[in-house]
Image (cartoon, helix red, strand yellow):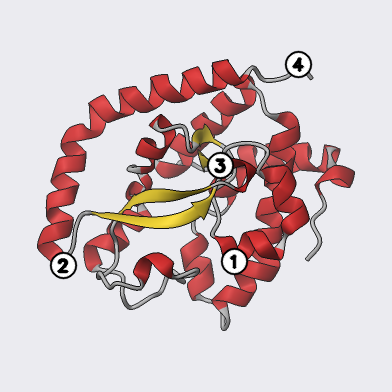
Amino acid sequence: MVPYNPHIKRGLDILLSSAAFLLLSPCFVFLGILICIESEGGPFFLQRRIGRSRVPFRLIKFRTMKSDRAAATRQFEPGGSLRITRFGKLLRRAKVDELPELFNVLLGEMSLVGARPEVDKYVRMFPVEFNEVLELKPGLSDLASIRYRNEEKVLAEQVDPEAYYRTVILPDKLRLAKWYVGNSSFKTDVRIIGMTLRSIFGRRTGRHERWIEACIEADAPSTRVRG
């Protein structure tokens, strides 16, 4: 496979994220006002995540929980947390809370496509796998984001959400992320962006799920993750 020119990938990130800002800026203002009206605190939530080459950065999201001083240091929040506001539940369900991450893309801390950034806790649990995954910038969306679009709902149904995430979901996310590291290309990015938009708007993704599995099975020996 021809190596993916990083300048092309960065150019795509800047072009699309800038266009998104121009189109969505009125929505940013409107949503920010509604968030502040519903509960005390600012419209944004910042949390330390681990980026490319293990360099930490502050992930920017719309605030969906009631504010408290310890929130930014927490490592895990199951989707059923009582701290989530009513409006926050709507933002999370539609994945709108992640739109401010476009700032992270413009700053060069993230890419439009790439493995979702994790907190220190989980990076330390899978050091070998994350060494490979963090060769690239984390992203707004990837194959795992599409497969686990309803992750919070699944976690809320578990007796021990954190254990289920650590032993079932995260290993599979890493398997998908490792595939992307070895198969990153302009064509792959465009396809993942298209699949992401379809999943956000409720389009069925059965055909895409079959494509994902076919790709992973073809690379099976190199994408296994120890549980």
C-beta proximity under 8 Å, tags 1 and 2: no
Q: Nearer the viewer, residue 164 or 202?
A: 164
Residue for badge 1: 121
Say whether residue 201 is left or right of residue 42.
right
Measure the C-alpha gap from mark 2 to mark 4: 50 Å
Three-letter code for the amino acid on which mark 3 is drawn = Pro
C-beta proximity under 8 Å, tags 2 and 4: no
In this rendering, which labeled residue sits more in front, label 1 or label 2?
1
User: Looking at the figure, which quarter contains the C terminus?
Assistant: bottom right
Q: Residue at x 62, y 63 (%)?
A: 122
User: Looking at the figure, which quarter contains the N terminus?
Assistant: top right
Q: Residue at x 76, y 33 (%)?
A: 182
Say whether residue 98 is left or right of residue 22.
right
For marks 3 and 2 on the same chain, the one whose residue lies earlier in the sequence: 2
For marks 2 and 4 on the same chain, the one whose residue lies earlier in the sequence: 4
Residue for badge 4: 2
